[in-house]
Image (tube, rainbow, N blue to C red):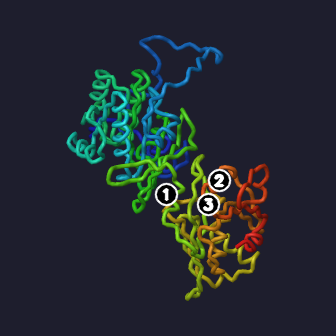
């Protein structure tokens, strides 16, 4: 705890703005009620000393003199993780892995460490939350060979740095950043100043020693990374591990990646033996789809650069209330209401006297407009009580006048639908241009043509 002589300042949790007094709104990022109190730092580690040795001064050089040697990467031998990282772990990189408690962050990183050790990579696993015995029990439950992983249960970052400098591992995992502290900082572990300075120390260590470091960060109930937002700006890569507690699948998404694309996702299945890769997410999402059921339509959504087929279900029935009920799960509530208004106005469907329920099966949440056409098809199918399950696959954006607009990545979506046998692909007519449309496909310009097809 800070004594009475210790000077304190206020930091913005969102952008790291520093102020001598508490402010209701941050002048830097305009966030409200984001200031927290922390001891004043006499000297910040920062990152300005990276690349310097003693008093050697950096000199400005021409862009043409910069070497373009490709980054050396270490393959994790977990295909979905390598995909998100951009082809493997870049040596000397600092990677932040965030997610809700119990989502599987530690499990994924421990499995990664086991795969790396099998390939002869030297790995250090540092835990500030679990004992070495607990980690051993979890490793045995996962069932893979992890005997060569070096374990260290420590929370003092200075001692961790000494161990890393002594054993010189290729990859190090810090679990978690909120439990680490620096002795010179007069603040509790997990506070703004501690998290910032510990991360700065790890960043300097990764660049100078050439060690690839993974740090685990907790996520708050608002869904943001705990600690100052500057934490995400300091690291090279930010990965978020997402998933619903009621669903077995997990999605690893890159929010930032200096060495690769942020449009890639990895899909995993959580089971009793840990996390297993899902090579075909579309097949996984459509598993258990009913046969010959009204109101069930296949849709193709894009998760990053990967097309995924999902089942859109709709149930339309007469209401018993003065105000009809509208319920959505996995789709945007306001957009479903808008689409129902379009169907009622342009097609004359009496949806104002009906309850409507829309569900994206599997627990996946889809927000892109390309889901519009599948939602409309499912609503019409349920309202008319026409069987469409497994016979219709659709994607496209629907406007207020009932027109069907084209969407991006139409070729990739159509090819993903083509992997299924049987369904009629209903797509925007504008997306048929330049498309090698072999098989059952129909391009439509408005929802009236959709009504005729159903």
Q: Position of residue 276 (x, y in %)?
A: 40, 48
Query: Relative to residue 305, is residue 246 drawn left or right?
Result: left
Q: Determine which quarter of the picture holds residue 27.
A: top right
Q: Residues within 10 Å of mark 2 (few under 14, many from 20)?
A: many
Along the line of sight, which residue is nearer the eye, 348 or 12?
348
Tell me which label, 2 or 3, sits earlier in the chain. 2
Instruction: Give the number of the disc on residue 413.
Output: 2
- What's the distance in space between the residues labelled 1 and 3, CA to CA? 16 Å
Q: Position of residue 258 (x, y in %)?
A: 54, 33
- What's the distance in space between the residues labelled 1 and 2, CA to CA? 17 Å
Disc 1 is placed on an element classified as helix
- In the picture shown, does residue 210 fall above or below 114? above
Tell me which label, 1 or 3, sits earlier in the chain. 1
Disc 2 is placed on an element classified as helix
Q: Which residue is mark 1?
A: 284
Q: Determine which quarter of the picture holds residue 383.
A: bottom right
Q: Position of residue 149 (x, y in %)?
A: 29, 33
Q: Nearer the viewer, mark 2 or mark 3?
A: 3
- What's the distance in space between the residues labelled 2 and 3, CA to CA? 15 Å
Tell me which label, 1 or 2, sits earlier in the chain. 1
Instruction: Give the number of the disc on residue 221.
Output: none
Q: Which residue is mark 3?
A: 421
Q: Determine which quarter of the picture holds residue 374.
A: bottom right
């Amino acid at each position: 705890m800070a004594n009475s002589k210790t000077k304190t300042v206020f930091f913005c949790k969102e952008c790291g703005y520093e102020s001598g007094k508490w402010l209701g709104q941050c002048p830097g990022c305009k966030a409200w009620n984001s200031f927290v109190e922390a001891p004043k730092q006499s000297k910040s580690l920062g990152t300005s000393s990276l690349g310097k040795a003693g008093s050697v001064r950096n000199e400005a050089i021409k862009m043409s003199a910069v070497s373009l040697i490709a980054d050396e990467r270490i393959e994790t031998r977990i295909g979905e993780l390598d995909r998100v990282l951009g082809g493997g772990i870049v040596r000397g990189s600092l990677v932040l892995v965030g997610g809700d408690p119990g989502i599987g962050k530690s499990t994924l990183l421990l499995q990664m460490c086991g795969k790396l050790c099998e390939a002869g990579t030297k790995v250090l696993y540092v835990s500030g939350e679990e004992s070495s015995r607990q980690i051993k029990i979890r490793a045995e439950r996962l069932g893979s060979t992890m005997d060569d992983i070096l374990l260290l249960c420590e929370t003092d970052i200075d001692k961790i740095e000494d161990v890393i400098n002594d054993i010189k591992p290729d990859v190090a995992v810090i679990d978690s950043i909120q439990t680490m502290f620096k002795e010179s900082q007069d603040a509790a572990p997990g506070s703004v100043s501690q998290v910032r300075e510990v991360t700065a120390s790890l960043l300097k260590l990764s660049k100078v020693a050439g060690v690839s470091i993974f740090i685990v960060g907790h996520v708050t109930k608002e869904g943001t990374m705990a600690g100052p937002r500057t934490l995400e700006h300091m690291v090279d890569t930010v990965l978020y591990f997402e998933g619903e507690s009621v669903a077995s699948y997990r999605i690893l998404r890159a929010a930032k990646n200096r060495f690769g694309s942020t449009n890639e996702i990895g899909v995993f299945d959580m089971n009793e033996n840990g996390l297993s890769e899902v090579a075909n997410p579309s097949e996984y999402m459509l598993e258990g789809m009913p046969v010959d059921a009204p109101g069930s339509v296949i849709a193709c959504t894009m998760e990053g650069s990967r097309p995924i087929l999902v089942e859109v279900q709709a149930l339309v029935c007469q209401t018993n209330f003065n105000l009809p009920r509208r319920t959505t799960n996995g789709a945007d509530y306001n957009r479903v209401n808008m689409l129902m208004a379009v169907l009622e106005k342009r097609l004359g469907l009496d949806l104002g006297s009906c309850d409507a329920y829309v569900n994206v099966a599997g627990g996946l949440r889809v927000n892109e407009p390309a889901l519009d056409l599948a939602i409309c098809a499912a609503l019409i199918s349920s309202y008319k009580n026409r069987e469409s399950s497994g016979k219709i696959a659709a994607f496209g954006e629907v406007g207020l006048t009932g027109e069907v607009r084209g969407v991006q990545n139409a070729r990739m979506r159509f090819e993903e639908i083509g992997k299924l046998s049987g369904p009629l692909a209903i797509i925007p007519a504008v997306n048929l241009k330049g498309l090698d449309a072999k098989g059952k496909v129909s391009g439509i310009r408005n929802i009236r043509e959709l009504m005729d097809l159903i």
